[in-house]
Amino acid sequence: MADRYEPSTFEAKWQQSWKDADLFKTREEPDRPKFYGADFFPYPSGAGLSVGHCRNYVPTDVLCRAKYMQGYNVLHPMGFDAFGLPAENEAIKQKSHPAPMIKRYAENYRRQMDLVGISYDWSRSFSSSDPEYYRWTQWIFELLYKKGLAYRKMAAVNWDPVDKTVLADEEIIGGRAERSGALVEKKLIPQWFFKITAYAERLLNDLDGLDWPEGIKAQQRNWIGKSEGVQFRMEVRFISDEEFQQAWNKGVKTETSSAATSNPELDALQAEVLASGFKPEADANVTSKANQILGNLENAAFQAGKPIESESVSHAFETASVKAGLEFAPRDRKLTFEVFTTRVDTVFGMTFCVLSPEHEIVDKIRAGVDPDHQKAIDQYREEAKAKTDTERTADDREKTGVFTGAYAINPANGKPVPIWIADYVLAGYGTGAIMAVPGHDERDFAFALKFNLDIIPVIKPDETYLRGFHKDGDFLYEAALADYLRNVKNFTPPFVSKDSEMINSGEYNGLTYQEGTASLGRWMEGLSIGERKTQYKLRDWLISRQRYWGCPIPVIHTKEGEEQLVPESALPVELPDVEHYEPAGDGSSPLAHIPDFVNTTDLDGRLGQRETDTMGGFACSSWYFLRFCDPLNTTKAWDIDKANYWMPVDCYVGGAEHAVMHLLYARFWTKVLFDEGLIKVNEPFARLQNQGQVLGNTPYRQPREGETLGLGEDGILVSYAEAKDIPEDQLTWRWARMSKSKGNVVTPDEMVATHGADALRIYLLFVAPFTADVEWDTAGVGAAAKFLSRIFRFTEDNKAHYVNDWRDLIAFEELSDNAKAVRRATHKAIRDVTKDIDEFGFNTYISWLMKYLNALGDVKGNATEDRSYALALSEAIETIILLLAPAAPHSADELWDSIGKEGFTYQANWPKFEEALAEEDSVTIAIQVNGKLRDTIQAAAKAPNEDLEKQALAQPKVQTFLEGLTIRKVIVIPGKLVNIVAN
RNA sequence: GCCGGGGUGGCGGAAUGGUAGACGCGGUGGUCUCAAACACCACUUGGGUUAAACCAGUGGGGGUUCGAGUCCCCCCCCCGGCACCA
């Protein structure tokens, strides 16, 4: 063996030996603990792996290898996320079929992964486009369908005009398709959805128990977007400006409906309803009677000067009837709409309300207003429609909107407020309508300023806001403050303070946010005007794709327009093997144009048509980790016992970019499967780690005349070859994520060829903390190779003294100081390395190995004369090889072989840490005076505190610092330091 | 704006409230060599000194503590995510 690291002489050899020995075949022995380590399911790109991918796979490999050596049954699988847009687009570009292409790419990935020595069990590998796999994806689809969690509906969805398909909300970033970069359009077509919203609360709550990066959990929480508030009804009134002014000045809070609901006539009616035996034919009778009673009530209240909210009374009655089990249609409803707010405590500050332009009630309001307002409404809706989502959400968005001419009654004070339509209210969230409180909401404030609408503060502002509002020691509220808010544009009112009390809110004045919210919520519920409600931002998961290369949706549409699931026995619905599969572009799938595929028979043998949309790729990757537990099963998706044995994935490693897509979808499916009793875990990934990116140095030159720069770039991208011919002062180097298009990719192939796989692995582990981005530096790989050479040299220099059965002999030997020092270094290394691998501290793992090697070199023992040293050295040689093995498995096996060991390090036992051997006899004690380091002393590790104190005080240097001072206190931390407090 | 993560030598980065800068890169000097490369040895936070002593020092300001990179409060900056979500 050489005394240096020469990878070309042994790396390929060991890879072959591992393969011949089937070394990485998953072990499933009873009585061993299990460890499931997985990397994110990769899409095998034609560009192949870069060293950036290796930064994901190598650390997982280290962990899995170490776990195996520590006695675990390890599941470390790899497969390919082959279905989906990227593969199809690539195949279209190449004018080939995706199936053979993806197979070739996957094989190349595998070759590269083997090249860097990743310990995958390839016997468990599969691609999501394998019919044996997607058969079960379809099976899960049917399961969801049967549970009502998969449905088809007409929807205005995100249409990507470049990829010619619809996309999920999660795939849209700032109005653009994440993949193609195209501005998405809204398109109204029937689409398949998974009802992930039904699991919103559980997806949110269960995040707490996961060992995941905080950032990912926060992103998911934010995406789910839970908010609790009150949804209440507002009644539309068509009144004149004068009537509005009058009513605004007066305003009467709506009476509670308690009188109404306890009205004896209504009670009698309810009794009658119950007595009718819940017969539907009673409805007409009951309805008419109820309407009569309600009308009387309303009139009486009005004449008494206490108007009641008629809608709420009939609603109360309706509720009672429904509770009694009777379908009951009340008289013609008045025109109302609902608003959602998280700050019902500010309801008295409502000075207008806003509908989204798409709100369905706008048509009805339009019908009730004069032609001028009708025109304004029409015009605004036209404009809003023409705007893309991007324009609507642009950064410099200026508020736009238009007054409808109609008013709505604020139930809290009976005052009418103008109804506006504006596109800052989103149709898709809440009810698509809001109460606007400009005094305490930034957006409403901006809107009110622009359109000169009233601003009323209803939360007592914080003292600090009110510098400038003092008038003779009193705060200026109400009109003066409103005036001020309106005139001073750069003033920021206390928009969302929850720490102050309510003002200008009638009987609610003085209440806190909590009291006010609860009390108003209760009041509205009592009146049946509103109810406390929880809203989520999360929407259902759109899975339809109008593309060929995906998992077919196993549904048949019958002639009658009904949906039928393809029987389980007929799965999979296979993709037809066709030559032309380009997207149609008209919103239909290419499959729709393949008659042989479309035309089929339904369950009754009649003609039917297959669903032609395919599932988006994220469906396929939402359960693959379960298939890995039992990948060859031909009768089931997985055997429950096998899945229950391996699941959950103990450590899941991949990039942070999947935070709200794959990771959320996979959690959703797992929960559904858990509910079905198909798996006993409720969460798929117990622990998640995101690796940092590897950035490549990327040259840009200054633009020439007439050249335009790309988005966000300050130069023209050039290749390395071009860069050589460009003067230095015209070049700018930037660090950018490695990508084919940037031409800054470093491949594992070239690194393995020039520096070796192990050097690449060590470099990737050592270069930075696992989660940090790194700037690629080939010189660093050289440094890693140098470290490996030092281990080879150490082994070569000492292997003549290696005693194979040192373990049996060392106990009988009196250890020399040198032997003790070696054993101490050995056991400290075992302790620290083991801990750091477990905690994903791979950079410090490697540095412990370096320190260990340095420490061994520092001990100048004589192995020929000192038997105990020779034995300790033998232990050290073995230990350093084994501790190195997960990181540099080829080198470890080469070294292992060179000291005469049989087999592979992978099969050897992980070194056992012995506490007693790691302990120091003598330690350095720091001596501080008033917390400042003044001296150090050597002392026995177990020296009593009094001795340390005595020694410390006796130090001449300490004495000089204590001169003229009185010692107040001496703090002794055994084994660490002595601090003398004096003044 | 909101949420999450950070800010430590020339660089990547170490540090259960207890000697800040481990480990490595780079640099300087030396050994080996005809020479270079490789390798090895020594030094390498800044100021200060022949050398030491000593002083300062973990983005800034306060605080808790015998003792703070680490804990608490305020502020600044960088990275990532979300963004008119009522």
Image: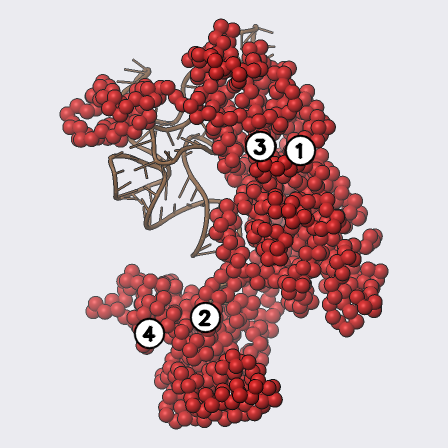
Q: Amino acid at mark 4?
A: Tyr
Identity of the residue drawn at 52% across and 92% down: A289
Identity of the residue drawn at 53% across and 31% down: A766
Which disc number belongs to residue A24? 1
Q: Nearer the viewer, mark 1 or mark 3?
A: 3
Marks 4 and 1, how far apart at CA? 70 Å
Q: Amino acid at mark 1?
A: Phe
Name the spot of residue A946 as percent of width and height, x first. 24, 24
Q: Nearer the viewer, residue B51 or A902?
A: A902
Marks 1 and 3, how far apart at CA? 14 Å
Label 4: which residue?
Answer: A508
Q: Secondary structure at mark 3?
A: loop
Output the chain of dot 1: A
Question: A305 above or below A392?
Answer: below
Q: Amino acid at mark 2?
A: Arg
Of labels 1 and 3, earlier in sequence is 1
Which disc number belongs to residue A71? 3
